[in-house]
Image: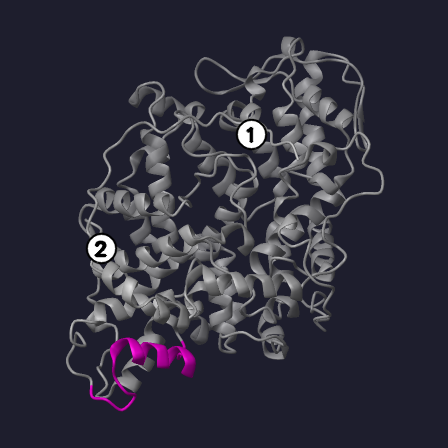
Amino acid sequence: MVIRYESRVDTPPYRPRPQPKRRRNPARRILRSRRGILLAVGAGAVATAGLGSTAFMLFRDEGIPGSPTDRSGSPWDLGAFADRDASYVQFLGGAVDLGASGLADLPSKAAEAAGKATPRFPTPLSRDPALHLLRRATLGPTAPDLAEVRREGIDAWLERQLAPEQVPDDSMDRALSTFPLVNMSTAELRGTLEGGSYDAMFQLGQATLARQLWSHRQLYEVMVDFWANHLNITNPFDGGWDNRTVYDREVIRRHALGRFNEMLLASARSPAMLRYLDNASSEKRNVNENYGRELLELHSVGIEGGYTEADVRQSAYIMTGRTVNDDGEFEYRARRHWTGKVKVLGFVHDNKSGSQGLAVGDAYVNYLARHPATAKYIARKLAVRFVADNPPVSLVDRLAQTYLENGTAIVPVLRVLFRSLEFWISSGLKTRRPLENFVASGRALGISPGPNIPDAMRELYYSTERLGHAPLQWGPPNGYPDVAGAWNSAHAMLGIWNSHRALVQGWHKGVVYTKPEYFATPRPATIGPYLDALAQRLLFEKLAPREKNAMLAFLGLKDASKVPNSTLGGKVQHLVPLVLDSVYHALR
């Protein structure tokens, strides 16, 4: 496989910036001496990898992208970004029948599907539909979230989340006011910043993390993350100093629960996208294929869409003339547009003059957005996000059909997904990526920013950088991978463990924490019920005997031992991170 990163993406090294002072990790000695305990509670990537592989095998079927019979002139010859996630699962087992017929013909029956679904495969997680929904449809459950779903019901909660403008988010709006550059227009940014400044883009990354941690519009934030990866533009990058924040606001956030064809059209006129994939410099005498290729391979039909290398070239011809003017705004220049008959897949146009070029390009983008291969490609990615790393073809087909029947509208697709038995039967078959684990930890622990929000968010953002999964920071145009196999490493596991200790023990400046001794309140008299209360507070369910015994061994106590004091003899600050290290928290 030929990797084409160098010619496709401009990802310069970051500007030097102050890094937080390295703090001694008081848990390091505990970690060294308690490795057996950590493994016993199913910690991090070790347990996650096994469950991820189980998920791959459970959902393996013949619909996973594979090699066409004839690849001559195909992008498969060069290798591709889009086959990456599938490559993690193609080598695993045979098809498994879930026995899930689906409820796609019913208007709104998520609760009914949840009641009918009984997971058929081993999982350490309890059978709790409300908790399963929150693990997938938010960046991590909180106690108020769980109470809300149980009070309102699954259907009502989902419908409210699918209309985020109806969900009050005043506290989030106040927090975002401390990141003023995020809401500026290109003209305002150019009037405020020095050319090439990364300031707005760093504010964007930190504001994105803040939204994931504290916004009440959680399903919306999950979908923003999904589309930001689908139409990825790394943040920061040199060409984004005056437009990357605008792209996030006007392309991704505006259309995250709208129509995909409108989002794709907006991205095709975005100065950030045109610079990132070099279309701003593409013109008829020197055609650059980067954007034309990714428009097919990543943004629409996918590598299984049946296009050829000749189609890639024609795609690049169609998009010539779209550029960025001296004010940093989108501009179409007819004299730069390649003219002549064009054909990509089933799209054909005479394309006789430069004056037609913009309309031809818009028609082409609309054609791609409504193509059946695009429907299937997006449907599969949604099923990977919400169901399993290797989702059943029957579900993907129903989602794709809904996408086409509703003119590329996303909300009807999500309604079908959330009322499918496949969704409700998939408990425990997705793992949290590092950023999701970090955010879910912060949400479960109830951390909040202090009076100086920028300082707090800077600290937290640097932590996600150390995990290799900072918001929006993936360099290549394919977005962060969303399967467990992509994140299996000792580095990821240790990074997650350390992040739990940092969040519990208050290593980050500017962040308000709950002291670990207050997570099991009112405090039970004996240690067994204490551990049950602690797990219920952080994981929203009790530990199984194996994990509970490992915690008891760590404490050196018996189930019936009296709780010595509020700090458990100084061990509570290490016990709470151990609970988050468990496989219960590692699963999405």
Whether 190 is drawn above or below 1: the answer is: above
Residue 25: numbered disc: 2
Residue occupying the point 68% across, 22% down: 316
Which three-letter amino acid code belongs to the residue tagged 1? Tyr
- Sequence-wise, the earlier of marks 1 and 2 is 1
Q: Is residue 522 magenta?
A: no
Please give the residue where the numbered disc 1 appears in the rendered image. Answer: 5
Residue 558: x percent and y percent? 28, 87
Describe residue 31's horizontal placement relative to residue 71 as left or right. Answer: left
The amino acid on which the numbered mark 2 sits, given as a three-letter code, is Asn
579 left or right of 224 in image: left
Q: Are marks 1 and 2 in contact (CB under 8 Å)?
A: no
Q: Residue at x 42, y 24 (%)?
A: 238
In percent of width and height, residue 103 lies at 69, 69
Using the rendered image of the protein, determine whether residue 216 is visible from the camera's viewpoint.
no
- Can residue 22 be seen by looking at this rendering? yes
Asked where in the image residue 494 lies, by quadrant, the reply is bottom left
Residue at 42 percent across and 80 percent down: it is: 546
Tell me which residue sits at (56%, 55%) in the image.
385
Q: Which mark is residue 234?
A: none
Q: Can you give x and y, in whole percent of width and height, for residue 233 in the image?
A: 50, 34
**Which of labels 1 and 2 is toward the front?**
2
State the SS at label 2.
loop
Residue extent of the magenta highlight: 541-562
**Secondary structure beneath label 1:** helix
* Observer-nearest of 491 and 401: 491
Residue 551 located within the stretch drawn in magenta: yes
Callout count: 2
What separation in Å lies between label 1 and label 2 (alpha carbons)?
A: 37 Å
The answer to which of 221 and 107 lies nearer the viewer is 221
